[in-house]
Amino acid sequence: MATIARETRAARGHVGSEVGAYLRHLDYLLIAAVAGVITYGIWVLTAVTRNDVPGDAGYFVSRQEVYIAVGAVLAAVAVAVSPEVYRRYANALYAVAIALLLLVLVVGDDVRGSKRWIEFGSFRFQPSEIGKVLLILFLAAFVANRARSDSPWKTVWGAVGFAALPMILVFKEPDFGSTLIYGSALLAVLFFGGVPWKHLASLAIATALIALSALWFLPAAGVEVLDAYQKDRLIGFVNPDVDPSGTTYNVNQSITAVGSGGIDGRGVAGASQTNMNYLPEHNTDFIFSSLAEQRGFLGAAILLLLYAFIAWRGIKIVAIAPSLYTSAVAGAIVFSFLFQIFVNVGMTIGIAPVTGIPLPFVSFGGSSMITTMLMIGILESIYVRGRLAGRR
Amino acid sequence: MSSPSANLPGGFLPPDPRVEEPYRVTPQAAIRIAILGVVAVTIFCALFFRLWALQVISGERYLEVAKNNQVRTFRAPAPRGSIVDRNGEVLVSNRPGTAVQLWPAAFDQATPETQTFVVHRLATLLHIPYREIRSDIAARKDDLLTPITIKENVNEEKINYLLEHQNDFPGVQINQTYQRHYDEGGIAAQTLGYVSEISQQQLDAAKGKGYAAGDRIGQTGVEATYDTYLRGLPGIGRVFVDALGRVTSARQFQQLPEAGDNVRLTIDAELQKTAEEALAYGVRLAHDDGQWAADGGALVAMDPNSGEILALASNPTFDPSIYTGRVDKNDLKELADPTANHPTLDRAVAGLYPPGSTFKPVTALAALETGILSPAELIQCTPKEVVDGQTFTNWDPYANEPMTLTTALAASCDTYFYQVALRFYNRTDSPLQKWARTMGFGASTGIDVGPEATGLIPTPAWRRHYFKTEIDKIWTSGDSVQLGIGQGDVLVTPLQMTRFYAMLANGGKLVEPHIVQSVEEPATPGQPPVVLRPYSPKPAKDVGLNPNNIRVVQEGLYDATHANYGTSAGIFGSFPVPIAGKTGTAEKFVRLPNYQGLQDQAWWCGYGPYDKPSLVVCAMIENGGHGGVVAAPVALQVFQKFFDVDPNSFNASVGNSD
């Protein structure tokens, strides 16, 4: 008994030192950068939504703070969980993702013509956001498990096939933005999963063919793949002056808002584009325009620099990851994060098509905030394990 | 070690297949991580450069755009000028009203569901069919910056409701407008015309004249001809609005609306009313006969010396107030219905009719001036006359006596004029037609409201040109005979006829008929109106008739109303003011629902007082029968009103037939 007790104590001491080592090896620069961007995001959201709900200036911010708290807890859990757990239960995670995405199509709330949300009482939940993480965890496992297989072809097209199903489901909602993000995640998993260049190239050609047929060949043959509004947005993106008051109205108003911010911004009271509702969805998809209008180039640059810092730490984590699986997961998280920032900010300044992609950490919304924080937690978990493995 | 083709590319994974962990970055993986780094740098560079371009380089310009963004220019309609009669009595004025309008730009931003919802609620609230509002909005698809007027004259209760529920009606706004108000009811409807929203064609045609979509513009009559004066200058101003088009500031005017000028007519409202009532009475009178379709008529009362028109009536007529506010499509359908018989047509100016015997003075004067007839010459007035094998009858089958010109005019002997007209047949230079043209027929009179019909004086050349078959192309003796009594192909407007009788009354001068006296500044109470622009008609033109010849015809017209054989002596014989005038009954082939064949157009034209004429009147009842029976009593009522004659002071019976 005594021995056992001693052993237990020893184990405890071991565990204690393990936790200490664990905590010592966290990437505190990443944590600091994320804390900074979240704080900055709260400050932006406070200013932008001040007049949105009459009589309750803090309506959106108080809710966002709750989401941040939930996200922080989930991130902490993710830091503790070994990524190998996800790898082991990858198929289950995929099944959960598909189930949620099917569920939203059946019971989802119809908001402005698209079914993206499932309602729980007063709480709304967007499955396509959490689906993003689940898809990355599954695809990376699929690719990593087949790393030494004899047929990389099967690996590539198998991954494409598994990714295609959720992409089609979110496209059905319709949520074109999430479809693009899922695509970017697939690409990153294959890229960091070590798929040979020639397979990546053939995949790129296939993607180009699909895009062309969706936009061109099939409509010419009488089969419409994209809804008219989706097509308009893509065309409007290429030529914003086609219809200044219709489809591209939002983009032109957004560009005006951003441009009018100048170097140091128009301030909260002076930001007429935001205050007079010329900017659509200025607390979610177009929040960057409001930030740029209120705080100018300086305010926008601070946010972008914080993002760039997070990206830099993320890339480091891809390099330090302890396994092919974790490397692919980290690569996909970092790339989809970058992709999301580019498409969202690019949309507001007219260099990317209009899609409903939120701006990570800043746009109002629980699903996006919690998912993004969860992804950071996974990155940290990979980082810690990479460093601890390297120490051995 | 497995072959490179079966494995991941050489060097991506650690070389030993059993050793996967601890994982070490291989050079192959490092390349890919480096590529991710390059992508990240590229993305942030692209965003930074674009932001720099927008905010730092073009910031000023976008700031300007943003500042203008929430400013909306608006046009405030100016109160339109009033139309008053010669005595200053108001015929048409303005009523301020409240209009419900829609900003297409703001409406456009709403989702389709919201749009449907808003239009449905408006339709219910304002009692306008949903589809009509939708089609109005669709019509303005290309012009999103001009408000669409949904309804004018909306009552206060509904306005308050809309104002209180602004958030439920994105793009809906309340605006002050002015509406035409017809103070004297619908009198002189065709002459005054109506006002309605400018059409796209009109907008295109009037480019550069300061009209804008949504403006109201005079469409016909005085409202159209004098629109430039009446409409005034719309105010232009700015308001601040939010993205939903809700006004967030007071209106700031850059240019205040300037009220339109008033237009003073030569019309006498009282006489006009009498004329319209008399005309309606004449139509009823003719209709009651049962023999005649009697579906309309026209009357002109004019000062024979100045050309000022004192009354200009056309029957049937319509209520111009149907054009104010939102036009009810059913009303327009009713107006356009064939059974309504074209109530918007101004028959006095644009109606064409054969003149019949009222044309005989033209024949008489032409013959006298050409020298083929002498006033004292006696010509046998026979019951009928055979010309080249064709028989032409006299309206009075019992007449058979030699007549001078005055007698023939007074008794309106057809056969006398057949024989005179025949004398023109042999002349190659068509003197009758030439004189008819000189005396104002076959051309517009130049009246300031239109459109005006010109009429037709048939000539051999016209026949050759107009007809297809060889037989029809020939001008026969019958054509000359017909023209001599104002029958056949000749067509005149009541206004041309009035002007001709004015010429007889004033001793040979053609006046320019006009309906507007002056354009005036709106009078401040207690002050006389300031005339801005008097109407200056062309001076009356002497057509070069021998005064003696005119006198003979005048005598003939006097006898027609006073001699016992005169065709309207029964009506005017005992009238205290000496009136001279001529009846006319012109056959016209018509196709009407219940009346097919020849219908008589009833005419009476004349003037008074005989020695010093101050009023010329021409009355015409369309398909109304005999001039002496239905047209002369109509004219009598107008004279009676004008000269303020007690109806009991004289004895009017029915006139003779013709």
Image (cartoon, grey):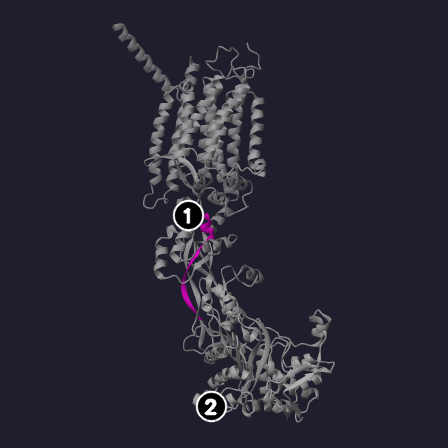
| B254 versus A245 height, above or below | below
Position of residue B657 measured from the top left corner of the image (x, y, whole percent): 55, 85
Position of residue B232 measured from the top left corner of the image (x, y, whole percent): 49, 67
Q: Which chain carries label 2?
A: B
Q: Is mark 1 on a helix, strand or loop?
A: helix
Q: Which residue lies furthest to the bottom in this view?
A: B376
> Closer to the camera, A180 or B619?
B619
Position of residue B286 measured from the top left corner of the image (x, y, whole percent): 50, 79
Residue B95 forms part of the magenta stretch: yes
**Rendering quarter of residue B524:** bottom left
- Sequence order check, earlier mark of 2 and 1: 1
> Closer to the camera, B306 or B39?
B306
Residue labelled with disc 2: B651
Which residue does the image show at 30% across and 10% down from the upper left?
Answer: A10
Q: In which quarter of the image is the N terminus of chain A?
A: top left
Which amino acid type is marked by label 1?
Answer: Thr
Which amino acid type is marked by label 2?
Answer: Asn
Position of residue A282 measured from the top left corner of the image (x, y, whole percent): 42, 41
Number of dots carrying numbers:
2
Residue labelled with disc 1: B114
The magenta segment: B93-109
| A343 versus B385 height, above or below | above
| A257 versus B442 height, above or below | above
Residue A224 can be seen, yes or no: yes
| A43 versus B97 height, above or below | above
Q: In which quarter of the image is the C terminus of chain A?
A: top left
